[in-house]
Image (cartoon, coloured by chain):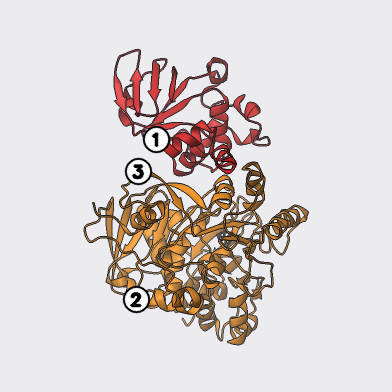
Amino acid sequence: MNAKGKVFKYGANVDTDVIIPARYLNTSDPKELAKHCMEDIDATFVDRVQDGDIIVAGPNFGCGSSREHAPVAIKASGISCVIAPSFARIFFRNAINMGLPIMESKEASERIGNGDEVEVDFDTGEIKDLSTGEVFTAKPFPEFIRKIIEADGLVGYIAEKAKS
Amino acid sequence: MSMTMTQKILAKHAGLDQVVPGQLIEAKLDLVLGNDVTTPPAIDVFEKTNATQVFDSAKVALVPDHFTPNKDIKSAEHCMKMRRFAKAFNIENYYEIGDPQMGVEHVVLPENGLIAPGDAIIGADSHTCTYGALGAFATGVGSTDLACAMATGQTWFRVPEAIKIVLTGSLQGHVTGKDLILYIIGMIGVDGALYQSMEFAGPGVASLSMSDRLTICNMAIEAGGKNGIFPVDEKTLAYLQKYAAERYAAERYQVFAADEDAEYARVIEIKLDDVQLQVAFPHLPENTKVLGEFERVDIDQVVIGSCTNGRLEDLRLAASIFKGHKVKKGIRCIVLPGSQRVWKEALKEGILEVFADSECVISAATCGPCLGGHMGILAKGERCVSTTNRNFVGRMGHPESEVYLAGVPVAVASAVLGYIGGPDDLNK
Ligand code: SF4
């Protein structure tokens, strides 16, 4: 499993309110949520983001409320992976449950620049900055987490298990 | 490699010999909990999982405690949805108000014998961490997690690091477990234990009652902790024998202890004798001050109860301080027994009569005003001293109201005085 795309870079403590402002929580439709993703921190994000792109941010990404809408909005916007040194505990759970891949790497977060082309290998945890040639390693996902992400989230994973 | 108590419980439930902090594991669960706020959305998710039944109808607990007795039509419908689900899937541990097993979820689950040492438990409620008092691993999750766990009996965890809190000596005077946990949160902050377990240890543990331990673990989340956990000792086993007699007799529990050389992210040492009466000022549990070290704060309301301090020991203590005193004219004091069982015992022991004589109002054994639901909401500018666990902005009503967190003795004394004070101020 791989992801490849252009990087959107943000700072520390990106909170759930800027990821998806509370005023848009009256819907749970991923497409609607995606229209406002990152709006309060980067108003042009939704116009520029393309399928496969990657967010690289500072520590404590996703702090704040427990809203599952935050990872849903990021994923529906086309982002294929978020890389940060650390994630807030509930965001971490929700991201995996919603099938949004996240990787923890302090070096990658510090050294990758805005707009760089980056390739991520979820099986090995290798993060390659194609623009600079630098390579970083994050912890790869164990198999069941890869399966959750492949099944588009925990619900899909369990539904598939129930079928077999 | 050596492991902490939490790590050992997680390893066991994941079928592994060894786990390390940061590792992602899939673990089997002994109990899955939901309430009337978190279960209805989980039921929608459950339907999408293709599950045709819950993994074990004896290992799911559904407690309608937040907005019951139904506050309004919306909450009545939420409860109805949960009731129908419970019936359809034969959920054994579903309770209605008035039921001898009903009450606030974190008070009733241990009382109903559903928690034992070594268990792994998740609940779609952040204070699920309460059960660590019995040497179990318990943590709060979201509605999707609840739904999937009801379907499969499993969930995934990231193995936490731990903070070791070494206790020596014993609490003095009117100081309770509540003061201890407020003191710790004041020291490390509301994110001081983020991602981590708070593992209590040391000779001081033996001096703490089970009720104190439940209060302390209840508030681990207020320091950002994933779970709080106490070692298992004679008091734990006596509690188990009383409330989970069958499991105790059949030895269906497992005692885990941290390895001597387990690694901790941080070690904190606390002499219990030095802990003083604490009050957490608005609007964070970490804003703690020592009683007597702040200017007079006049109040409008006092709440005694909740999953933090609504156990029989708490009510006994409250009654012993109230005896011979009355709630100050113009002040409201609401007592919420934590469970129907506590309510009945308090009635038998004459405790409820003491409250009535002291001019308190005695409420139903549910959450009530704790989360700003109903039955005691604050108006703009009003101040409340509460034995609950959160004093966030608007937690008990108007965004400009204020909640001061304290233990039972300070709450009772404040109700009598009309301002924040301690039992020693009553006889001045
Ligand atoms: S008593 Fe308060 S903190 Fe406890 S479960 Fe109810 S609302 Fe939550």
Find the distance from the CA under tag 1 to the CA under tag 3. Answer: 11 Å
Note whether A89 is above or below B425 in the view shown. Answer: above
Q: What residue sits 67% from the left and 72% below the top?
A: B99
* Side (left or right) of B15 relative to A43: left
State the residue in front, B366 or B327. Answer: B366
Q: What residue sits 49% from the left and 33% below the top?
A: A149
On whether disc 2 and disc 3 are found on a single subunit, the reply is yes
Q: Is label 1 in contact with label 3 (beta carbons under 8 Å)?
A: no
Note whether B221 is above or below B103 in the view shown. Answer: above
Chain B on-screen colour: orange
Q: Position of residue B2 (x, y in %)?
A: 24, 54
Label of residue B22 in the image: 3
| Residue under pointer 2 | B207
Label of residue A132 in the image: none
| Residue under pointer 1 | A141
State the residue in front, B40 or B50. Answer: B50
**What secondary structure is found at the residue carrying circle 1?**
loop
Find the distance from the CA under tag 2 to the CA under tag 3. Answer: 33 Å
Q: Is residue B301 visible?
A: yes
Q: Position of residue A44 (x, y in %)?
A: 55, 18
State the residue in front, B271 or B50. Answer: B50
Quadrant of the picture in which ligand 1 is shown? bottom right
Chain letter for the part of the structure drawn in red: A
Label 1 neighbour load within 10 Å: few <14, some 14-19, many 20+: many
**What secondary structure is found at the residue carrying circle 2?**
helix
Q: Which label lies toward us, 2 or 1?
A: 1
Q: Is label 2 in contact with label 1 (beta carbons under 8 Å)?
A: no
Q: What residue sits 28% from the left and 68% below the top?
A: B202
